[in-house]
């Protein structure tokens, strides 16, 4: 089997000034498609959903990080329609603060596996995630201070987009294309000073089915 292939990605740091934000996103043709979106914004309002080409995306989580005054969220959609279509993010009210957006689509994925969400802890913040054969891992970090590294696994720096949401966000970090062998891995996030969050999620290959509801590897430390 093979690890999921990252086909296209999109990062943006807009200020919506509205109760939604939308953009055109191109999902390339291919088998076993998966579309994901990582979001961070001020928690003055919440996320009320995402759609792609009018189809509702599944919410993996929407986590209020009260200590940072931020809300971080992750949505995904299996086998999205191909081509250039509208990806729309809806809010519970007008969002006047900047938001961090990272969208990415894969082929060769059976969906979302285990995840972990760890709130701000002293930098470096090192956490674990258990994955299946051929999986990849995506990670996001948020801090008052600049994000300096996201390592997937620990010791392997991955590139990421840097955004300012009145906090500092590192988003879109993805592990190497070769994927992992089944096991437990350390993911490390660092900021230049203080504390930093550590949010990580497994992008499944085709060698293992998605876990049953409630089987995820959850860490609900705010």
Image (cartoon, grey):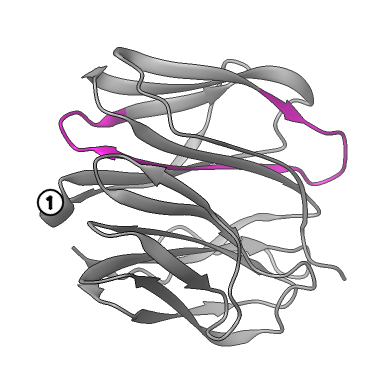
Give the answer, above or below, for where 218 lies relative to 186: above
Q: Is residue 90 above or below residue 9?
A: above
| Identity of the residue furthest to the top in this view | 18
Can residue 216 be seen here? The reply is: no
Q: Which residues are magenta?
A: 25-47
Residue for badge 1: 66
Name the residue at 32% across, 70% down. 192
- Queried whether the magenta region covers residue 32, the answer comes back as yes
The image quadrant that residue 99 belongs to is top left
Q: In the rendering, at what x and y percent does residue 20 appear?
A: 38, 16
- The residue tagged with tag 1: helix, strand or loop? helix
Figure quadrant of the N terminus: bottom right
Q: Give the quadrant of the C terminus.
A: bottom left
Q: Is residue 163 visible?
A: yes
Residue nearest the observer in this picture, 78 or 199: 199
Residue 196 higher or lower than 16, as above or below: below
């Amino acid at each position: 089997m093979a690890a999921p292939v990252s086909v296209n990605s999109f990062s943006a740091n807009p200020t919506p000034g509205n109760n939604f934000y939308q953009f055109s996103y191109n999902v390339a043709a291919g088998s076993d498609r998966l579309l994901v979106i990582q979001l961070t914004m001020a928690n003055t309002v919440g996320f009320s959903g995402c759609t792609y080409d009018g189809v509702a995306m599944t919410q993996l989580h929407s986590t209020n990080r009260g200590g940072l005054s931020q809300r971080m969220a992750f949505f995904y959609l299996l086998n999205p329609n191909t081509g250039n279509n509208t990806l729309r993010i809806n809010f519970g009210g007008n969002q006047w603060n900047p938001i961090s957006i990272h969208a990415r689509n894969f082929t060769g994925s059976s969906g979302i596996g285990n995840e972990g969400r760890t709130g701000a802890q002293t930098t470096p913040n090192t956490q674990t995630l258990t994955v299946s054969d051929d999986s990849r891992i995506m990670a996001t970090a948020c801090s008052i201070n600049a994000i300096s590294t996201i390592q997937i696994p620990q010791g392997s720096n991955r590139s990421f987009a840097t955004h300012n949401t009145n906090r500092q966000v590192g988003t879109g970090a993805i592990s190497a294309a070769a994927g992992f062998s089944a096991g437990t891995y350390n993911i490390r996030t660092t900021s230049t000073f203080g504390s930093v969050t550590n949010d990580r999620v497994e992008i499944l290959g085709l060698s293992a089915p998605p876990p049953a509801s409630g089987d995820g590897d959850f860490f609900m430390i705010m």
